[in-house]
Image: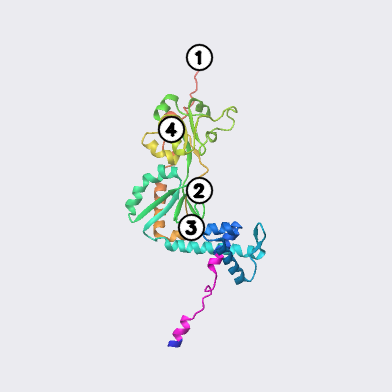
Amino acid sequence: MSERRTRKTEVPHSFERLPLNALRVFEAVATHLSFAEAAEALHVTPAAVSMQIRTLEEYLRVPLFRRSARAIALSPEGALLLPGVRRGLAELQQAMQQLRQHRSGGVLNISTIASFLQKWLMPRLPQFYSRHPHIELSIHTSSTPVDFTQTNFHAALRTPGLYNEKLLEEWFLPVCSPEMLARHGPIRTPADLKRYPLLRSSDESWSMWRHPGTESDWREQGTAFDDSLTVLAAAEQGQGLALTRWTLAAQDIGNGRLVRASAQVLPCPRAYYFVCPESYLELPKVEQLLAWLREVAAAFPAPDSVAAPEAMRTPPRVARVRRSGS
């Protein structure tokens, strides 16, 4: 029995002597092509970096870098090794990241864009919390793509990447305050825009609303802002006509702070997607969030189903009848 137990405890480990720390240092030096910059990134001394590279070269019995007085470069052997090291480190980091995440409860970290959060997602969050009180959301706003291997995010709501599922289509439409619509009248043709002071941002340009063949001398004018929510706030205050996204304006239109200035809507080339690493779909809290988002997104009406006021629609042509004898 004792001999049998000894055999079980002496199973060889293939990773026992693998120089993992040296491989991490090698990846940093290969990225920066500088021992000093790699040392700074790893928060160690250049001497420690040099020692780890020397240890790895001795372990592999090949030179990994070509050194000169002013610079270093990867050797052919180093260039062959680098992709595999990066893949291995990324998979190791992702495995450890998943292990640190709570599976069903605890904090659920989400990234999305600020305008979508404030105008569409935030008003619906109380419904999510009433259904899943054990899940605490931590929401970060950014327009940059999420690197799930380098952060603790579980999911993102933005343009697609990794596993992605479309939740919402998007549309552009012109809106303004009720008082401004009464003063300037509805937008039935592109020429009607000349009656309004225009509000614009880089994300919603009025040039998208213009039709081919309209006046060539038309130039987009009006106050420019650097974000969509400020444009919407200016429209609510009666400062002009805004071209905005339906998901941002629907609630304000519903409560009367804004009105549609035209019956026409313009499909947006972008949509909203739920994005996450495919392995995170197995986390119950991610699964519950996605199921809830599917439900509220399906219940969100498209602008065509929310009728524009009849006064905005192009009036039908009435045929003139000639009277004889006059």
Q: Residues within 10 Å of mark 2 (few under 14, many from 20)?
A: few
Dot 2 falls on a residue whose secondary structure is loop
Estimate the spatial distance between the alpha carbons at disc 1 and disc 2, rounded to whole Å.
72 Å
Residue 131 rendering spot, x and y as whole percentages: 33, 53
User: Residue 175 versus residue 219: which sits nearer the camera?
Assistant: 219
Q: Residue at x 39, y 37 (%)?
A: 252
Residue assigned mark 1: 324
Query: Which one is in front in this view, the residue at disc 1 or the one at disc 4?
Result: 4
Q: Residue at x 34, y 51 (%)?
A: 129
Estimate the spatial distance between the alpha carbons at disc 2 and disc 4, rounded to whole Å.
26 Å
Estimate the spatial distance between the alpha carbons at disc 2 and disc 3, rounded to whole Å.
16 Å
Q: Which residues are magenta?
A: 4-23
What amino acid does circle 3 point to? Pro
Dot 1 falls on a residue whose secondary structure is loop
Residue 226 rendering spot, x and y as whole percentages: 49, 37
Residue assigned mark 3: 277
Residue assigned mark 4: 234
What amino acid does circle 2 point to? Thr
Q: Earlier in the sequence, mark 2 or mark 4?
A: 2
Residue assigned mark 2: 144
| 130 is higher (above) or lower (below) than 52 | above
